[in-house]
Image (tube, rainbow, N blue to C red):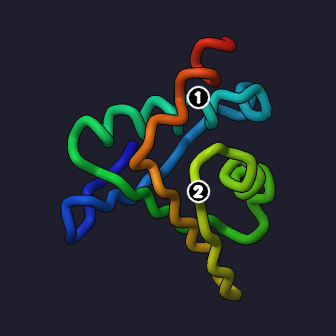
Amino acid sequence: RYEVCGDSETAEIAFVIEDGLQGRGVGKIMLYLLARHARFMGISRFVADVLPENVHMLAMFENCDFPHSMVWSAESVTVTLDVSRDRCSRHLLAR
């Protein structure tokens, strides 16, 4: 899901993926589908706060096709994704 932040171009995203489905690309597909919908709604940027030990989620963001940045602190990693351009098609069609 995503929740629009203070400015209408940024949304905070969060994922919950059942344990048995983790590691199968579900998160990445959800990311691209959410980005496609968000873009339609005028959102161009996603932000997410991820625990540093959640290496699988961080790897998903690191390996997605959206330009991104990661700011590390002791408590969390703030990930910012530029979702202003469609980068979804090849991932969604490959499934």
Relative to 55, 41 lies left or right: left
Relative to 27, 41 lies left or right: left
Disc 1 is placed on an element classified as helix
In the image, farthest residue toward the front: 85
Quarter holding residue 67? bottom right
Name the residue: 52% across, 65% down. Answer: 80
Q: Residue 23, percent across and down?
A: 79, 33
| Image quadrant containing the N terminus | top left
Q: Residue 28, percent across and down?
A: 63, 35
Q: Residue 6, percent across and down?
A: 21, 71
Disc 2 is placed on an element classified as loop
Relative to 71, 81 lies left or right: left
| Disc nearest the viewer among 2 and 1 | 2
The relative height of residue 6 versus residue 58 in the rendered view (above or below) is below
Name the residue: 35% across, 53% down. Answer: 44
The relative height of residue 24 versus residue 3 in the rendered view (above or below) is above
Q: Residue 64, percent across and down?
A: 67, 45
| Image quadrant containing the C terminus | top right
Residue 29's label in the rendered image is 1
Name the residue: 42% across, 40% down. Answer: 35
Name the residue: 34% across, 57% down. Answer: 11
Q: Which residue is mark 2?
A: 67
| Cα distance between the residues tagged 2 and 1 | 17 Å
Q: Residues within 10 Å of mark 2 (few under 14, many from 20)?
A: some
The relative height of residue 32 versus residue 13 in the rendered view (above or below) is above
Tell me the kind of residue under disc 2. Answer: Pro
| Total number of numbered discs in the rendering | 2
Among numbered discs 2 and 1, the one appearing first in the sequence: 1
Q: Residues within 10 Å of mark 1 (few under 14, many from 20)?
A: some
Tell me the kind of residue under disc 1. Answer: Ile
Q: Are the two marked residues, 2 and 1, in contact with CB atoms closer than 8 angstroms?
A: no
